[in-house]
Amino acid sequence: MIKEGKFESRQAIALLVITCLAKEFFTESNIIANKVGTAGWYMVLISAVVAAVGFAFVYALLKRFPGKSIVEIYDVVFGRYIGFVFSFLLAAVLLISAAINLREYIEVIKIYVFPKTQPSFLIISFILVVVILGFLGFENIARYSKLAAYLLLTEFIALFLLSSYLFEFYRLYPLLGYGLKNTLLQGFLRSSIFGEITLVAVFVKSLNETKEAKRIGYTSLIIAAVLLAIMQFGFILIFTYPFGQEIVAPLYTAASLIHYGAFFHRIEAMFLFVWNISILIEIPVLFYMVMLIYSHLFGINDRRPIIIPLAIILITMSLIPGNILELMTFYIRYIREYSWIVYYVFPAAALLVSVLSKKREDKYA
Amino acid sequence: MHRIISLEILLLVIALVFSGCYDAREINDVAYVLLVGVDMGVSDRFRVTFKFPSLKSGGGQDDSSGQAGDGLTYDTLTIDTPSFFAASELANINLARSINFMHTQFIVISEDIARNGLIGEFLAQIVRNSSIRYSTRLLISKGSAAELVEMLEPIEGSDLTKTCENLARQSEETGMFVDLALYDLHDCMKSTYHQPIAVLAAVNRGENFVEEGSVWGNKYQIPGDYYAGDQPRKGGGKVELMGLAIFNGTRMVGKLTGHESRILAMVKGNFRKGTLVIPDPKQPGDIIAFEVRPARKPQVKIWFDGDKPFIDLKLHLEGDILGIQSGIHYEDPGMLPVLENALERFIKTELNKILEKTQELNCDIFYFGHTAVKHFATIQEWEAYDWNSHYKDAEIKTEVRFYIRRTGTMIHTSETKFSREEQ
């Protein structure tokens, strides 16, 4: 049996913030620039507001059923069969997200860092870590996240400050990008960027009490939104919108531009740490969440036997996109534009049904 | 028992991993290209030249003759190929070393390629490859890029990398060119805000240096008013960077001298300091030298009347007197404005000439578009207006303010005394 311990809220916050931000280090800035042009930095704030509303539903639901995770609540509210479908869809979206994020990471790392290395070697090396972390348990991932968060934040700030000499404020104009209406729509659709915040509802039983979920969720959301807005702001100040739309990994490219005289340049290696560490938290977290939901769905108490089969499924799914364009224009696009349905709409529907059917297990029950 | 077996397995794995990769490459298996030159090809589309450390002298320790700098020797290889990466692949065959661009300092492209609008075609190949950094500097060579690459050698014992770095850094000291990387050119070529510029470079063979002849006398020549390679000089480095190439999209359409580049830098706000020499306003046969620096950021105001843009440009400069050849006592508080006005007039005249030149070329290299864009709310409106096409229609009003802050180590110029016969 994998021992599931409790962990403190700071560890949970670090874990959720890193999980939200990790995918943003790759092609996401490019995709945002394509969708909204110069308005990316405040589009993510619009997404954060939508995510905050979505999370309000999640927390309201958790409050009605204290001590229960969201998948257990689905069972209570919808019954075993419909609850199964809701939970299964959540697990599927998380698994697909993990697979495409893994593939995106491998593609980008192959383009920029290891052009001569076989993708299969990179994927298998990565999955080995995911499997080991799976065996070590969620508590260890959470503790490691908090430790890594300080390093990641320091590097993030250092890179932002070092690249600030490249900032040109005219690049923020035209301020409305491709139009305010478009920015609002894209901000709404891409609220899935912060969808991982709702994972707190999956691992809520690892917290000391359900009430902590509110603080963890909103704090993580605020931190992730601020960091992401800063990241997008820096990106648009370095690359004009037509140029920014061209680059596969704009943030890595920005780091490679840092050049202070003959002896202080090529510091994108620092950025590699941010990439690798963050993705080594994000994918194990998503993988573990899938494992938690899957074991709940099929009543599996010992999760160890399902780690390796799930890892093989993850590898297989990550190999489905034929090329990077298919990955970006189809898989990443749809998963990041529509997973808000699973993250926010499902809990909202469960809340509505529980209110209408007067199902609750809190002190007002 | 299990622990001992696990430990042994772990040690075996570590021994295997730490012994190095099976496909590892030693440093001398790789040719780190420092300079790349690109010309129009004769046997194929492009003529690509690579310059890299030869490692013939055993890692730079040999001090035998025929070597440049600190004992490092450099080899060049020129290949005619249809594309840049075909050239690097063919170079691998010829060198028995793998070409690597991670340490490339300059990419030199010949003016022919730039004038024919082929630079975009070439850059498209380069920027797509992650081994060439966006921070690599790009130069436009007046003559053959291959020759420039051959002639660019370390100066004063430093290695070639350091020489390139120092050459580029002179832009800060003089303002006669701008330190521009691949990133700048590629960004500008795609930009809807302005048109690109690139640094001009050339081999100076000393052809303009006349050893003997009639003396120059009191004629006035603006210092630095040359294109790269034209400066009358003897000695020093064989390659010089001076002036800027002006592009309309991917096509080079004109160029600026070192002096004009400096005026451009003043307007763009990236001029740090430089020496300006003007004719003495009271005794035009003599000259007065100033060290000029920006007093504050240039002020640019833009407004529109229909589609027509109006630009109001104010430059605020300050500086010190470096030399008064005539010996006139300009340090007198009443006389300082005479000098200030003279320099203001000089800069304004020069500035207006360059503005006219760029408007004729319809290339906004002054980056007025950075201010103009603030009048547009959305990208659609901005792109529909098309600033780069409207720049030629702009009505530009200029104003220059110059303030003398110090007079060097002298605060008074006393009258020179001559004996009666001399007078």
Image (tube, coloured by chain):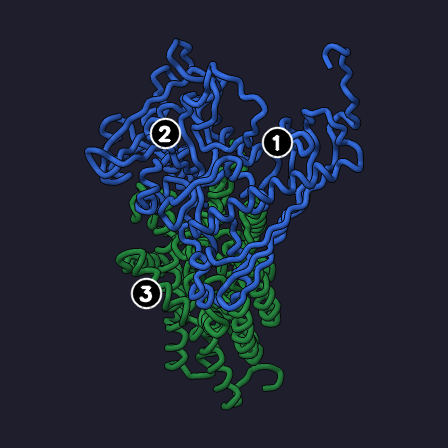
User: How far, Cα to Cα, is label 3 from label 2?
Assistant: 39 Å
Q: Position of residue A142 (x, y in %)?
A: 53, 57
- Secondary element under disc 3, as helix, strand or loop, is helix
Residue at figure coordinates x 24%, y 35% from the top left: B41
Instruction: From the image, state whether disc 1 or disc 2 is nearer to you.
Output: 1
Res A206 visible? no
Categorize mark 1 by other alpha carbons within 10 Å: few (<14), some (14-19), many (20+).
Answer: many
Which residue does the numbered mark 2 point to in the structure image? B32
Which residue does the numbered mark 3 point to in the structure image? A330
Q: Is residue B127 above or below residue A303?
A: above
User: Where the C terminus of chain A falls, by quadrant?
Assistant: bottom right
Q: Is residue B307 above or below residue A362?
A: above
Asked where in the image residue A49 lies, by quadrant, the reply is bottom right
**What is the chain letter for disc 1?**
B
- Secondary element under disc 1, as helix, strand or loop, is strand
What amino acid type should be assigned to the residue bearing mark 1? Val
Q: Who comes first in sequence, dot 1 or dot 2?
A: 2
Colour seen for chain A? green
B355 or B13: which is nearer to us? B355
What amino acid type should be assigned to the residue bearing mark 2? Tyr
Q: Position of residue B373 (x, y in %)?
A: 52, 61
Categorize mark 3 by other alpha carbons within 10 Å: few (<14), some (14-19), many (20+).
Answer: few
Q: Is residue B61 above or below residue A65?
A: above
